[in-house]
Every structure is written in C-alpha cells, then in structure tokens.
Image (cartoon, grey):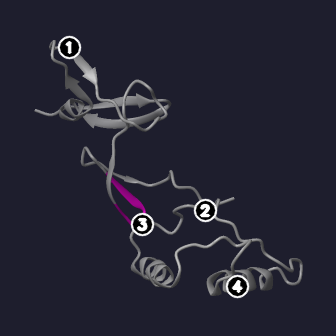
Amino acid sequence: MKSVEPIMNDGNIVFTTTDDMSQTEDTTTNGQADTKSSSVLHRSLHHDPLKVVSASGLYLTLSNGQKILDATGGAAVSCLGHGHERIKNAIKEQMEQVSYCHSLFFGTDAAEELAKELVQSTNGEMQKVFVISSGL
C-alpha cells in the first residue's frame, strides 16, 4: 500500500508517495543507496526535484502523478497559463516569419506593433520602447 509523505524541499513542501522515493534513489554497485545526479544545479544539492511532465492551463502535472496549481511562473512568465492554442498559434506564426533578431541592428513588424501599443497605452507619457529579450 502506498503511503503519502510530505518532503521538505528547501522550505517548500512537496507531497509524494513512498513509491516515488524509488524514483529519486538509485542503487550503486556496492548496494548502497545513492541520490541520482542531475547535470542541472538545482536549488537543493541533496536531491533532484520532481519533474513537471505536462502542463495545461493553470495546472502542472508532476512525475509522481500529482496535479498542482502553478503558482511558480510569476506574473511575467506564465500568467496566461500553459498550452493555450491562441498563444501557441501566435508564436508559431511569428517563428515562421522570424524567430529572433537583435533590436540594435534590425527591426521587425512584431517589435513595431508591440512598441506602438505600449506607447499608446501611456497617454503620451512614453514616446519610445527599447525591445530586448532578457525578460526584464
């Protein structure tokens, strides 16, 4: 029978079953349990986090089957949710035209349209927009 146990993950509590613990441990050749090692420098050096295997709307599905509300993406990253067809189609259409070019050297219709909308939304307070890809 599976039992559900909370695991403290650097201040975040993640619920997992005892069966899931086998996903985070591997047996070495001498029979000792050893934590699997990821090539990603995660927040904890003691264990790898559960993986997100799918996402839809506001919910993430973790590798242990748990479905949780995504409150980790932040207002500027995934505030619209995951997997929306309209957004995926807009991204696809833009990538068919151009995926990226540096704004100091080239212009694009997408950058011009975005800048115009942002400038107009300020009622004359802003006159220009500097488009960058850092997210800041």
Q: Nearer the viewer, residue 45 or 64?
A: 45
User: Which picture quadrant has residue 3?
Assistant: top left
Given the image, on which type of amino acid does mark 3 rest?
His
Q: Position of residue 6 (x, y in %)?
A: 34, 31
Label placed on residue 88: none
Circles 3 and 1, Cβ within 8 Å, touching? The answer is: no
Label placed on residue 112: 4
Q: Residue at x 48, y 29 (%)?
A: 10
Which circle's residue, 1 or 2, is located before the other in the chain? 1
| Residue range of the region highlighted in magenta in the rendering | 55-61
The CA distance from mark 1 to mark 2 is 44 Å
Q: Is residue 110 magenta?
A: no
Q: Secondary structure at mark 1?
A: loop
Residue at the disc numbered 1: 32
Q: Secondary structure at mark 4?
A: helix
Mark 3 burial class by Cα count in 10 Å: few <14, some 14-19, many 20+: some
The CA distance from mark 4 to mark 3 is 26 Å
Q: Position of residue 14 (x, y in %)?
A: 37, 37
Which circle's residue, 4 or 3, is located before the other in the chain? 3
Residue at the disc numbered 3: 82
Q: Nearer the viewer, residue 16 or 121?
A: 121
Q: Quadrant of the N terminus?
A: top left
The CA distance from mark 4 to mark 1 is 60 Å
Given the image, on which type of amino acid does mark 2 rest?
Ala
Q: Nearer the viewer, mark 4 or mark 3?
A: 4
Circles 3 and 2, Cβ within 8 Å, touching? The answer is: no
Given the image, on which type of amino acid does mark 1 rest?
Gln
Mark 4 burial class by Cα count in 10 Å: few <14, some 14-19, many 20+: few
